[in-house]
Amino acid sequence: MPHRASGSRGREPDGRVTMFHVNHEPGARIHHTDPFAAPADQRSPVRRLRGRLAAPVTLWTAPGPAGLTVSSTLVAEGEPGRLLGLVDAESELWAAVEETGRFAVTPLGPSHRQLADRFAGLFPSPGGLFATGTWLDTPYGPVPGDAGGWAGCRLDGSREYGWGLLVEATIERVELADDAEPLLHHRGRYRELA
């Protein structure tokens, strides 16, 4: 018979209600990893490779407002500068970008972990994604008031790419503040430069 929390009741197949014993011995642990995740040797080798590549954590926002945490962002120098990124085609961000044709990209720093989780859908956001914090309104979308910089982008095109949507854009505006340490994503966790 399975054990349940102290005081909880279970119903046997014959309809009898029973109480279950709880083991009160010390040393119980909560998993530090997702107990439902596939074991490492059963995960896609491509996914495992991607996890080994450190990536900058950025926040993409668009008028609406809408936003999404994105860790697949690449900037290409040139005249004009270009930006590539992989986003979720079903996200509210993508709907806003398609409608307005523009968006802002903000590199996040170590102090933005909770913000990154909120826009990734991993942290609660009562009142909406933009309800807390200070935001600077721009024609490209709101950007965090404490950001070390941001880029205003014009959408050039998009296409399905793997399980995401490859977004191509022209960088029209760059605002940089003091040098800021980056927030990185590596092997499923946020990291900082040593």
Image (cartoon, helix red, strand yellow):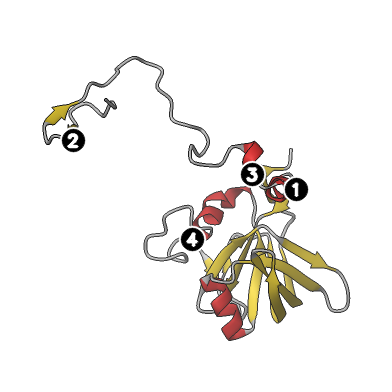
Q: Earlier in the sequence, mark 4 or mark 3?
A: 3
Closer to the camera: disc 3 or disc 1?
A: 3
Label 1 crowd (10 A; few <14 / some 14-19 / many >=20): few
Report, in whole angstroms, how far the alpha carbon at label 2 lies from the one at label 1. Answer: 51 Å
> Which of the two discs, 2 and 1, labels the residue nearer the N terminus?
2
Q: Position of residue 134 (x, y in %)?
A: 51, 64
- For label 4, the residue is 133
Of labels 4 and 2, earlier in sequence is 2
Task: Report the residue at 66% width, 43% height from top.
Answer: 187
Q: Nearer the viewer, mark 4 or mark 2?
A: 2
Would you name the residue on which mark 1 appears?
A: 53
Tags 4 and 2 in contact by the CB under 8 Å rule? no
Q: Residue at x 47, y 32 (%)?
A: 31
Query: Label 3: which residue?
Result: 43
SS state under label 1: loop
Q: Which of the numbered marks, if any, corresponds to residue 13?
A: 2
Q: Which is in the foreground here, disc 4 or disc 1?
A: 1
Report the amino acid beneath label 3: Arg
